[in-house]
C-alpha cells in the first residue's frame, strides 16, 4: 500500500490549535502544557524520544474536551469532580487512531492523583508520564491569571510553593522536585509567552522527520479530529463522518477515484474543525441567531481552512473543506468565491453537508423527510447556491444517500 508523507508535528500542533479554540480565544493551553512537560522530562534526563513523545501528549491531553463549559471547569479549579470524563473520552479517541494510540493510556490518567492506587495493568512508566501531564496542566491553571498582565514574575514563587505542598498527594515527588529546580528562574516562565512558545515549537518541528502513513492511518487521524468536533453537541453526533460518507459516494458517482477520492473523504471528515471555536450555546440555540452569533458561526469555515493548511500543505483538502459554505453566485462565506473558483469536490462537500444536516435533528427544527430535503436542495439550486449536477446525482440515488445520512 502506498505511503504518503505527513508532518505529524504540524498535524499535532494543528490539532492543539483547534483544541485551544474550545476556550473561545486561542489561549495556547495545550502548547504550554506540552513545553513544560518536555522541559521537566529533559531535566530528568529522559531519552530524547520520550521527551518528544511527552510533548505530543501535552498538546493532545485535552482532546476529550469539546464543550466550552467543560473547558472552563478544567481551567478555573485545581481539582474538579468531572475531570475524569474527558480523560476517558480522549483516551478512547486516541486508542482508535493508530498513529497516536500509544499515547492513549497516559491521557486516560492525566487527572489522577499520584497517591491514588491504579489498577495493576497500569505500569509505573505510564503512571509517571500521566502524572507529569497532570502536573504541567495544573501549573498552567495556576499561572494563567498572570500571563497577560505582566505579574507572572512576581507570582511564580507562590505557584512553586503551592505545588510543593501537593508533592506525594497530587503529584509524584520526583516530578515536583524537578519542577521546583527549573522553575526557580524567570526564563522558565517567560518561555510561555505566545511568540516564544510558537517559535520553540517550530524549532522542534524543524528537527522532526516527516512520517509516512498509508491512507487508512491518515483517515484515522482525520476521524480523530472529526470526533472531537462532533462531540460539541448531541445534535451534531457523527455529522462529519456521515458527510464524509456522502461526499465519498457522490465523488465515486462522478468518476473520482484513487488518492483524489480519499482526499474528498478526508475533507468531509474535517470540514467543521473550525467549529471548536463556536460556543455550544450558539450551536444548541433553539431560536434564530443574533447578528453577532451568526458572525461567530460564519468564521468556522475560515478557521477550518487555516488549520488544515498546517497539516495538508500542498493538498486540496484545506480548500475542499474550507469552502463548504461558498456558493455558485458568490454570496457564501468566508471568501465569497463564485462558481469559477469552486472545484467539483467543493460543490460535492457543500451538498453533502447540507443534505446530512437537514436529515439530522437540530435544536431549531426536527429531522426533515427525504422529500422535504430534496425540495430544499432544489430550491437552493434555483437560487444559484448549489450545483445542479451534484444535486441531480444525489437525487437519482436519494434513498442510498439518505441511509448514509442517518444510519
Image: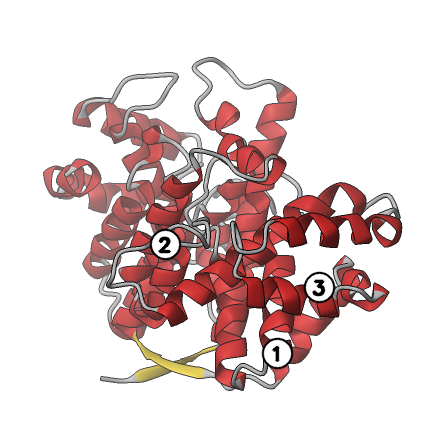
Structural distance between the alpha carbons of marks 1 and 3: 14 Å
Q: Nearer the viewer, mark 1 or mark 3?
A: 3
Q: Residues within 10 Å of mark 2 (few under 14, many from 20)?
A: many
Q: Quadrant of the C terminus?
A: top left
In the rendered image, residue 135, in percent from the top left (x then y), is placed at: 57, 56
Front residue of this view, candidates 41 and 85: 41
Disc 3 packing (10 Å; few <14; some 14–19; many ≥20): some
Image location of residue 191, percent across then percent down:
77, 65
Between marks 1 and 2, how big is the CA–CA gap? 23 Å
Quadrant that contains the N terminus: bottom left
The residue tagged with tag 2: helix, strand or loop? Answer: helix
Indicate left or right for 359 with 334 as reference.
Answer: left
* In-front residue for pair 153/237: 153
Asked whether, in this view, residue 276 is left or right of residue 266, the answer is: right
**Residue 265 locus on image (x, y percent):** 30, 59
Q: Could you tell me which secondary element the residue under label 1 belongs to?
A: helix
> Mark 3 highlights which residue?
180
> Which comes before the other along the chain, label 1 or label 3?
1
Which disc is residue 108 wearing? 2
Residue at x-position 37% and y-position 69%: 124
Q: Position of residue 238 (x, y in %)?
A: 28, 42
CB within 8 Å, label 3 to label 2? no
Label 3 – label 2 distance at C-alpha: 26 Å
The answer to whether 59 is drawn above or below residue 199 in the figure is above
| Left or right placement of residue 354 versus residue 129 in this view | left
Dot 1 or dot 2: first in sequence order is: 1
- Residue drawn at point x = 40 percent, y = 71 percent: 125
When the figure is inspected, residue 261 is found, relative to residue 232, above or below; the finding is below
Label 1 crowd bin: few (<14), some (14–19), many (20+), radius 10 Å = some
Circles 1 and 3, Cβ within 8 Å, touching? The answer is: no
Q: Which residue is mark 1?
A: 42
Q: Is residue 28 visible?
A: no
Amino acid at each position: 500500500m502506498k505511503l504518503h508523507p505527513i508532518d505529524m508535528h504540524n498535524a499535532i500542533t494543528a490539532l492543539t490549535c483547534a483544541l485551544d479554540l474550545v476556550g473561545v480565544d486561542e489561549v495556547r493551553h495545550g502548547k504550554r502544557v506540552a513545553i513544560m512537560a518536555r522541559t521537566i522530562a529533559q531535566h530528568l534526563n529522559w531519552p530524547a524520544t520520550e521527551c518528544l513523545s511527552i510533548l505530543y501528549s501535552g498538546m493532545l491531553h485535552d482532546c476529550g474536551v469539546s464543550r466550552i463549559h467543560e473547558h472552563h471547569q478544567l481551567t478555573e479549579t485545581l481539582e474538579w469532580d468531572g475531570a475524569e470524563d474527558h480523560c476517558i473520552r480522549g483516551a478512547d479517541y486516541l486508542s482508535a487512531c493508530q498513529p497516536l494510540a500509544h499515547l492513549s493510556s497516559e491521557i486516560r490518567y492525566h487527572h489522577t492523583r499520584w497517591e491514588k492506587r491504579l489498577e495493576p495493568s497500569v505500569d509505573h512508566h505510564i503512571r509517571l508520564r500521566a502524572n507529569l501531564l497532570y502536573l504541567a496542566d495544573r501549573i498552567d491553571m495556576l499561572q494563567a491569571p498572570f500571563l497577560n498582565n505582566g505579574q507572572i514574575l512576581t507570582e511564580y514563587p507562590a505557584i512553586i510553593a503551592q505545588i510543593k505542598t501537593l508533592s506525594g498527594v497530587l503529584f509524584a515527588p520526583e516530578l515536583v522536585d524537578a519542577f521546583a529546580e527549573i522553575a526557580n528562574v524567570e526564563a522558565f516562565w517567560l518561555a510561555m509567552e505566545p511568540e516564544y512558545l510558537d517559535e520553540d515549537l517550530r524549532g522542534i518541528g524543524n528537527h522532526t522527520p516527516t512520517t509516512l502513513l498509508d491512507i487508512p492511518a491518515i483517515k484515522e487521524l482525520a476521524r480523530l479530529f472529526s470526533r472531537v468536533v462532533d462531540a460539541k453537541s448531541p445534535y451534531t453526533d457523527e455529522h462529519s463522518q456521515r458527510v464524509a460518507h456522502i461526499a465519498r459516494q457522490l465523488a465515486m458517482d462522478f468518476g473520482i477515484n484513487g488518492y483524489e477520492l480519499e482526499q474528498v473523504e478526508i475533507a468531509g471528515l474535517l470540514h467543521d474543525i473550525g467549529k471548536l471555536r463556536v460556543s455550544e450555546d450558539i450551536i444548541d440555540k433553539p431560536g434564530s441567531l443574533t447578528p453577532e452569533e451568526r458572525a461567530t458561526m460564519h468564521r468556522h469555515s475560515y478557521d477550518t481552512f487555516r488549520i488544515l493548511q498546517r497539516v495538508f500543505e500542498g493538498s486540496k483538502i484545506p480548500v475542499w473543506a474550507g469552502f463548504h459554505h461558498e456558493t455558485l453566485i458568490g454570496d457564501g462565506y468566508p471568501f465569497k468565491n463564485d462558481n469559477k473558483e469552486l472545484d467539483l469536490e467543493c460543490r460535492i462537500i457543500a451538498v453533502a453537508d447540507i443534505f446530512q444536516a437537514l436529515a439530522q435533528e437540530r435544536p431549531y427544527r426536527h429531522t426533515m423527510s427525504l422529500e422535504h430535503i430534496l425540495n430544499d436542495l432544489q430550491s437552493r439550486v434555483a437560487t444559484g447556491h448549489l450545483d445542479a449536477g451534484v444535486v441531480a446525482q444525489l437525487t437519482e440515488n436519494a434513498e442510498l444517500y439518505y441511509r448514509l445520512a442517518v444510519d
